Amino acid sequence: MSLREREISAHSDGSRSIHAHLFVLLLACLNLTACASLTLDIVRDDQLVASDEAPGVDLARQGMLLRATPGMALQAGDELRTDARSTAVVSFFSGARAYVQPNSQVRLGSLLVYLGEVLVKARGYFRVDTKYATAASEGTEYLVRVDPGDRLQVIVAEDRVSLSSPSQAWPTKSLGVGQTAHLNGPDLLEVGRAAPGEVEAIRNRMRSLDQVVPSHAGIGTALLVGAAITAGAVAIGSQEHNERDSDRRRRTPDRPATDQLSPQDPLGPARRR
């Protein structure tokens, strides 16, 4: 392989390497945003808890009980349990929020509700799992309530929610504003209209909580995407520099070494200009 061919091959390999690193970086950003960017706030008796203690909220991580504190970063797999006076507000950097109401227990990740009531406010895809049903949305507000005995209710306050059975025991249902679904264990009992005032109560509760809880949405995503854009700009700049350098070399023929020139050829240097 000639020197020029080796240079072109090395340049091509470098470009592929840059693209591969960018792809990995973007995947890392997406994974971090989806899985690790969770922030906890606590509202107790309609007041934001601002001290180092978090009364009324228990946090378990990998089987260990930790002290929950306002503003702390949560992780996928963490479990939260609230008492009768406290609401845990989990803010996702994607912009979504989950309001874990009093006397509730959930596991974070896609958000698995074991018991109690969770209000969801999302502006993108968001999923709430229960033992016998999954409620997924793209930009909406809704409630998921799990009562003792695996009785489940979903109420939609804005846009639409897709309700499906993990075991495919019944066809997927699409719920609109003001609609509700009731389940008893794996059995879908009915889909109908919510009781008067229920939808407005959900909206009012979300608004009141948003007024006392600071917004963390978008910070982590902006930082991660900014890092990806910066890395991409550096990589693209480096690639353009390599391309210009390679193009300059292709336009300039290789010169043989001085000791290879024939002294009997006075036109040799002139022919090479």
Image (spheres, grey):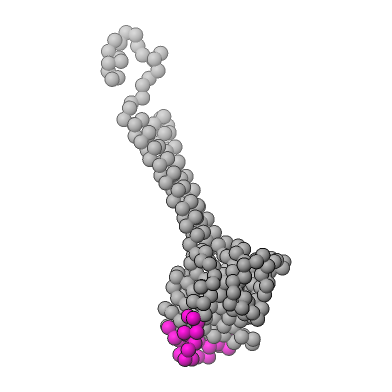
Residue 228 in the image, given as x and y percentages of width and height:
47, 52
Residue 155 in the image, given as x and y percentages of width and height:
49, 84
**Relative to 87, is 68 above or below?**
above
- Work out whether residue 122 can be spotted: yes
- Work out whether residue 98 can be spotted: no
Residue 215 in the image, given as x and y percentages of width and height:
51, 66
- The residue at 45%/48% (across/down) is 230
Residue 124 within the segment the image draws in magenta: no
Q: On the image, which quarter does residue 252 sit in? A: top left
- The residue at 58%/81% (across/down) is 117
Q: On the image, which quarter does residue 262 sit in? A: top left
Magenta region: which residues? Answer: 177-204
Residue 6 in the image, given as x and y percentages of width and height:
43, 33
- The residue at 57%/61% (across/down) is 36
- The residue at 52%/64% (across/down) is 216
The residue most toward the right is 64
| Quadrant of the snapshot with the C terminus | top left
| Quadrant of the snapshot with the N terminus | top left
**Relative to 5, is 172 above or below?**
below
Residue 188 within the segment the image draws in magenta: yes
Number of marks present in the image shown: 0
165 horizontally vs 259: left or right? right
43 horizontally vs 239: left or right? right
Camera-nearest residue between 173 and 121: 121
